[in-house]
Amino acid sequence: MGEGADIRGGRLPAAAYDENFADLQPPLARQEAVVEAARCYFCYDAPCVQACPTGIDIPSFIRKIQTGNLKGSALDILEANIMGGTCARVCPTEVLCEEACVRTVQEGKPVRIGRLQRYATDALFATGIQPFSRAASTGRRIAVVGAGPAGLACAHALARRGHDVVVFERRAKAGGLNEHGIAAYKMANDFAAREVAFILGIGGIELHLGQALGRELTLDALRRDHDAVFLGVGLGTTNRLGLAGEELEGVLDAVDFIEELRQSPDKATLPVGRHIVVIGGGNTAIDIAVQTKRLGAETVTLVYRRGAGEMGATGHEQEIAQLNGVLIRHWARPVTLEAAGGRVAGVTFEHTRLDAGGRLEGTGERFTLAADQVFKAIGQKLLADELAGSGLAIEAGKLRVDDELRTSLDGVWAGGDAVAGQDLTVAAVEDGKRAARSIDRALGN
Amino acid sequence: MADLRCTIAGVKSPNPFWLASAPPTDKAYNVVRAFRAGWGGVVWKTLGEDPPIVNVSSRYGAVHFRGHRMAGFNNIELITDRTLEVNLREITQVKRDWPDRAMVVSLMVPCEEASWQAILARVEATGADGVELNFGCPHGMSERGMGSAVGQVPEYIEMVTRWCKQHTRMPVFVKLTPNVTNILAPARAAVAGGADAVSLINTINSITAVDLDRMAPEPVVNGKGAHGGYCGPAVKPIALCMVAEIARDPDCAGVPISGIGGIETWRDAAEFMALGAGSVQVCTAAMHYGFKIVEDMNDGLANWMDDKGYATLDGFRGAAVGNYTDWGKLDMNYDIKARISDELCIGCGLCHIACEDTSHQAIRFTQDAGKRRFTVIDADCVGCNLCMHVCPVEGCITMEEVSEGRPYLTWAAHPKNPQNLKAAE
C-alpha cells in the first residue's frame, strides 16, 4: 500500500467518456425490430405477460411492431406501464418476461422483448405525440410524495382519472432513481428527464421540487390539505459496513457517487481512483464497478460475501461487469479498512463459507486489496427522519401496506422501494398504478 | 454418386437445372456466368420481332414476409429489349462455347404463320437445342395480342404450335400461363398441336402491394401501376398442382414437362420431378441470391438420390403422380389423432387457441404447478392437422393413425353418401 492515493478525473481521452457512457445497447433498427418481432409466436395466455409485474400485453405490442402499428404498440406498453421506456432499458428481463418466453424453453434465446419495447416506445417519443388525456375534473386533490417511478406512475394514473395531483420531491430534479441511481449508459441521452416530461405532459400534475417529508413537509399537513396521500419516498439512506474507519476519506457510498455521476454533464470531471474495491453483490455494486471502470480506473474488484448465485445482480448484470473488466471475487467479507496517511488505502477481507447450519462464517484466512477508493454498495433502507412521528407502521424495514397498498394510516397509500417487494422500476410503477386505482375507488369514483 | 444427366424432349443437359426465360438469360454475359456456375441449361430470354420493345422503370414488386425478402416477386418487364440480330449472334456463340448445356430459345411474335416461320429459321441457324413458345407472359405483351393472350385461347395454342412444328426440326416447348380456370385445356391444345414438351407455370396476374401513401399498386411507375406476373416461393404450390394435373392427364399423353414456379432448392426440384417434371426452370431464386445456388441444387439432389437409391432422374421422376388423386378417391376410414409431446412442448398455447377459437375444441389447456399442459381430447379431435401446423416446435405435435384396420372406404361407398342412402331405400 503505497503512500498518496491516485485519485483524479480525466484519466481517459475526452472522446472516450462519450463512448463509455453512450447507450450500452443501441436501439434496434427498423428491420432488426421487424425480424425480431417475427420471432414472437403470439402465445395464448402468454407466459411473458404473466412474468411482467405490470402485465404488459407483450405479444400484442410485438405484433403491432410487425405490422407497423407503432403507436398502437407503444400504447399497449404505456397503458400498462407508463415508464415502459425506462423499463425497456433497465428491467432485468432475463429474470422476468424473457425468462418466461417460450423461446427460452425452446432454444435458450428469448425474443428480445426489452429491446422491442424500447423500439416501440422510442418511436412514440420521437413523434412528440401526447397520447393521454384527462377525464373530466373530479375536483379531488391528491398529494404524492416522491417523484420517482412509483410516485409518477401514481400521479399519472390519478391525473388520467381527472384528479388534480401535487407531487413533492426532495431532490432538485424529478425521476427518482431513473434520474439519479441507474447506470448512466442505460439511460443515455437524458432519457429519464424526457420521460418525466412526457408523464407530466398529460397535465393536472403540479411538481414541487426540494420538498421533503420531515423537512419542508409533514404527513399531518399533507393529509389535512389533500383528499389522499401517496408515499413513494423510496429508500433514503444506505446500510453501513459497521467497520472502524468507515469515515475515512476514500470510503464512499456507491449510491451517492452514482447520483453525482448521473448529474455530471462532463464525466471527465469525476475523480476516480486507479484501484477500486467495491463491496456488495446487487445491481448498485455492479453499476458502480462498471462505471468506475469506464471512468478509467485501472483495476476494479467487486467483493461479495457469498456466491454468484446469491448475488442480487442477475447473471446478465454480472456478465456486463466481467465484460467490462471488473474482477468479481466471491465468498469474502470485509474485516478491516486499511488506512494510510489519514485516508483509506485498502480493505482486508476474510474468506467465508457456509457452516453446517447454512450460516455464513469466516474461515480465518485473509487477504488485502489495495484501493484508492472503496465503494459500499450493501443495500439501502428507509430514511427514518422522513417518517419520524408519522405514526406509519413499519414492518421488516419497509412501510407496511395491505394488498391495495394502503398504509396503516387512513387516506395514506405507499408504494415503490419503500414497501415490501422487488426493488425494481417496473415493480414501483405497478405499485403506483395499483395505488391510484385504490385511491380512485376510495374517493368514490 | 447419382447421375443427374437430364434429357427432356430430346434436349440434353448435364443436370436438370435450367434458368428460365427472364432477365438472367437476356444476354451472353449472364448466361456464360450461369454456365460457369454450373447451370445445366437456359431458356434464353424471349426474342421478338424488331424493333425491340422498350421497358419502363421500375419493373419489380415484391412480397416480403415477416422479414424474409421476396417470398413472392412480380415483374412488369417485357421480352428482350435488344435487337434480334444481337441476340442471335450471342446465342450462336454461347452454344458453340458450351455445347453440353441446353440452349432453348424463347420466342414471341404476332399470331401470323409467316412471323413464326421467319424467326424459327433464324433461331435454328444458331445451333440452339430447342424453342419455347412464350404463351405465358401475362403483362404488357398480352395487351398486344401475344403472350398469355394466346395462352388463354386453346385454339390459338394449337394453331401456333402446329405452325412451329411444321417450320422447324427443333423440339418445341410450349410455355403455359396459369391465368386460366383449368390448365388442362391449354396443355391438351399444345399436345394436339404437336408440342414436344410444355413448360409451366409462367407468372400469375398480380398486384404485390398497394402503396398507401401514393395510393397506387406496386410497382409504381410515376404514380400508376399495372398488374404484373407473380412468381417466387409463394407460387410453388400452385405450380405443383398444375404440373401434377398435366402429368396424370391421359389426354396429355405423358407430354414432357419442364417445371417452373418458386423453385429455390434441390428439394423443390425433386418435388416437381416427383410430380412428373422432366427438368426444372429457376428464375426468382437466382435473381435473389445469384447463380451460385445451383451448387447446392446439384449436390443436394445427388446426395438425396444417393440416400434414396435413385441412380438416375428417371428413378423417381413421376413417382408421386400415381398418388395424386381426387378427393372422392380418398379413404374415409383413415383416422388420425393429434399427439402432443409433453417433453418437447414449450407451452406457447398456439395449438389450444387455434383449436379452441377456429376448430373443434379438442385441445384442453390446464396448468399444474406452473406447468402449462395441452391435452388432446380424442373424442373431439377430427385429425385436421391444424395444431401440428401452428406448433412452432418441429416434431412436438404428431398425428397418430388410429384407423384400427378398417378397410379403404371412398365417399362413393360411404354409408352417409345420399346416393347410397337412396340406393338402400
Image (tube, helix red, strand yellow):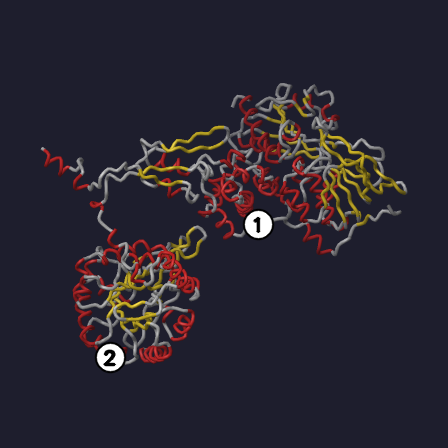
Q: Quadrant of residue A230?
A: top right
Which residue in the structure is indicated by mark 2?
B121
- Rendered position, B172 above or below A8: below
Image check: B130 left or right of B166? right
- Rendered position, A424 above or below B208: above
Query: Residue A26, image x and y in percent?
Result: 59, 50
How far apart are the two marked residues, 1 and 2, measured between alpha carbons?
A: 63 Å
Chain to which the residue tagged by mark 1 belongs: A
Task: Please tell me whether mark 2 sits on a helix, a strand or a loop.
Answer: helix
Chain to which the residue tagged by mark 2 belongs: B
Image check: A192 left or right of A120? right
| Residue at screen point 32% across, 80% down | B85
Front label number (1 vs 2): 2
Q: Quadrant of residue B242?
A: bottom left
Viewport quadrant of the N terminus of chain A? top right
| Residue at screen point 18% across, 63% down | B189
Which residue in the structure is indicated by mark 1?
A27
Instruction: For label 2, count other residues whose C-alpha is less than 10 Å away and answer few (under 14), some (14-19) or many (20+).
Output: few
Residue A131 numbered tag? none
Image check: A1 left or right of B93? right
Query: Residue A87, image x and y in percent?
Result: 59, 40
Query: Residue B268, image x and y in percent?
Result: 35, 57
Mark 1 belongs to which amino acid?
Pro
Q: Nearer the viewer, residue A142 or B191?
A: B191
